[in-house]
Image: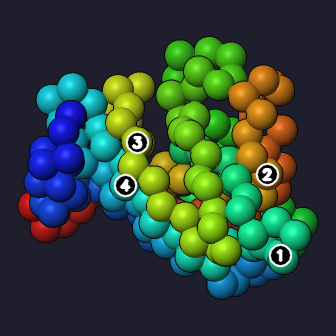
Amino acid sequence: MDNYFLNYILRKAPDAFAYIRGSNKYPGIRGNAKFFVLEEGIIIYSEVNGLPFDAATPFRAYAYHIHNGDSCSGNNTDPFSNAGEHYNPDELPHPYHAGDLPPLFGNYGYAWNTVFTARFKISEVIKKPIIIHINPDDFVSQPSGNSGEMIACGIIERASIR
């Protein structure tokens, strides 16, 4: 995929999107994920601001996953508990879940990435949560890569303007 083609895709209206918002503990997190369907799979373009960092760790990695729940709600101790586990319809070990995405690499609280995946169809993840975790994914620990607290969440919605 060359840069011209990628620029062309990213200028189109997305097929789906998620507005990502931080938990009460991390209210400054704001971002979005845009999903573009191609014949070969899906491009996910994500941009997030307000990620936690400090002077000692201004460049941090954050785990990033699609989960199998149905909302970004929860309780006082786990604000996104209803997000469920990683989206994993084929019951594969981590990091081969359909919802396992590459990490977000933060730079002074800002991160963006673009990833291509053919692990799911867009219709399979509509109404599913996309989650940012406080820790980077270790790609080994089961079932979720030791990614820690869920700090931000957004629900994937079908785009209404096409």
Which label's residue is closer to the chain start, 4 or 1?
4
| Residue under label 3 | 115
The label on residue 102 is none
CA separation in Å, label 1 and label 3: 27 Å
Q: Tell me where residue 59 appears, x and y as whole percent.
A: 71, 62
- Neighbour class for label 2 at 10 Å: few (<14), some, many (≥20)? some
Q: Nearer the viewer, mark 1 or mark 3?
A: 1
Residue 125 is left or right of residue 38, and the answer is right
Q: Secondary structure at mark 3?
A: strand
**Residue depicted at x 73% and y 39%:** 137
| Residue under label 4 | 45
Circles 4 and 1, Cβ within 8 Å, touching? The answer is no
| Residue under label 2 | 135
CA separation in Å, label 4 and label 1: 26 Å
| Residue under label 1 | 54
Q: Quadrant of residue 7?
A: bottom left
